[in-house]
Amino acid sequence: MNPIFKEGPSSQHRLVLVLIFSGALIFFDHKMDSFEGVRGNLQSLVSPLQYLANTPKQMMTWASENIVSRRQLMKENQDYKVNELKLHQRLMQLDILKHENERLRLLLASPLRSEIKKMVAEILSVDSDPYTHQVVINRGENDGVYEGQPVLDEQGIVGQILHVGSTTSRVILIADVTHAVPVRVRRNGIRLVANGTGQIDRLNHSHVSHSADIQTGDLLVTSGLGGKYPEGYPVSTVTIVTQDLSRPFAQVYSHPVAKIDRLRYLLLLWPEKTTETFAAKNKNALVNKEKVSVSK
């Protein structure tokens, strides 16, 4: 019986033909560059596949660089705010030294004031009474906070510590009607007293003589009198000066430089003398505790 399909060349013959054909292709491609155009066309056809194969890797790289957890972002944001608060406090100190050096050139040859100890505190709650301007912070006696301690933000004086607990403290703001700050005009050194009016955007300065050289826009800074606030920190800017001769004194109002209605983080200051006194008290308390233990 004859097969329907005739047998083709044997496998040996096919191998020889393939080798001859391959050798010819190699010769023409190497010596005559006959397939350069074909190779370029094939590369163009394969390029989309290469981009497609590389897409998952690019997407994973983009995701790892741009997708960050919410908690990490909040932590970084809080760290930036704390660093900014400390930076503004340092800038205020530099500004104080600059203006003092301009008024007293001999200060250039004097040693600079020592570094003031400071601590960042966060506001926990705000007093809901519209006639009382007080806040509660997350620092207390365990952190070395004491009554009367000066408190400020990145702009200037905010108030002072009113009551101290073990882990929290209450701060009375400069806008409170019961609060007063000894200040001076930075331009000429005239001393005033900044009294709270119950309004967050206004301070009152009573008993100001009509002859006092006070102008709108003057910056008022702490005078250092009374021992509560260190000297030279910004308090407010004069906004209204009314000299009515029918009144015994001029009417002077100023606007606090601190953002009292937008407080979140505060800075506590320890003047040098207060720091030494606090350290001495702790040392005495420790000695007394050791004596009690020995007696037992």
Image: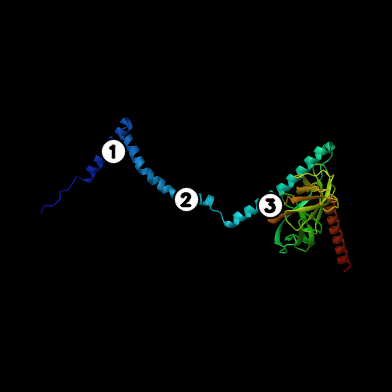
Is 139 rendered above or below residue 62? Answer: below
Label 3 vs label 2, nearer the camera: 3
209 sits to left or right of 119 = right
Q: In the rendered structure, which amino acid carries the disc numbered 1?
A: Ser
The picture places residue 267, in percent across and down from the top left corner, at 74, 53
Q: Is residue 282 above or below residue 99?
A: below
Which numbered marker is on residue 82? Answer: 3
Residue 35 in the figure: left or right of residue 155: left
The percent coordinates of residue 262 (x first, y second) are: 68, 55
Instruction: Name the mark on residue 22.
Output: 1
**What separation in Å lies between label 1 and label 2 (alpha carbons)?**
42 Å
Q: Are marks 1 and 3 in contact (CB under 8 Å)?
A: no
Instruction: Identify the mark nearer the N-term, 1 or 3.
Output: 1
Q: Position of residue 282 (x, y in %)?
A: 84, 59
- Upstream in sequence: badge 1 or badge 2: 1
Classed neighbour count for the residue bearing mark 1: other residues with Cα under 10 Å, few (<14), some (14–19), many (≥20): few
User: Looking at the image, is mark 1 or mark 2 nearer the viewer?
Assistant: 2
In this view, 133 is above or below 101 = below
Coloring applied to the structure: rainbow
Vertical placement of residue 218 versus 181, above or below:
above
User: Label 2: how many residues lie within 10 Å, few (<14), some (14-19) or many (20+)?
Assistant: few
The answer to which of marks 3 and 2 sits earlier in the sequence is 2
Residue beneath label 2, please? 59
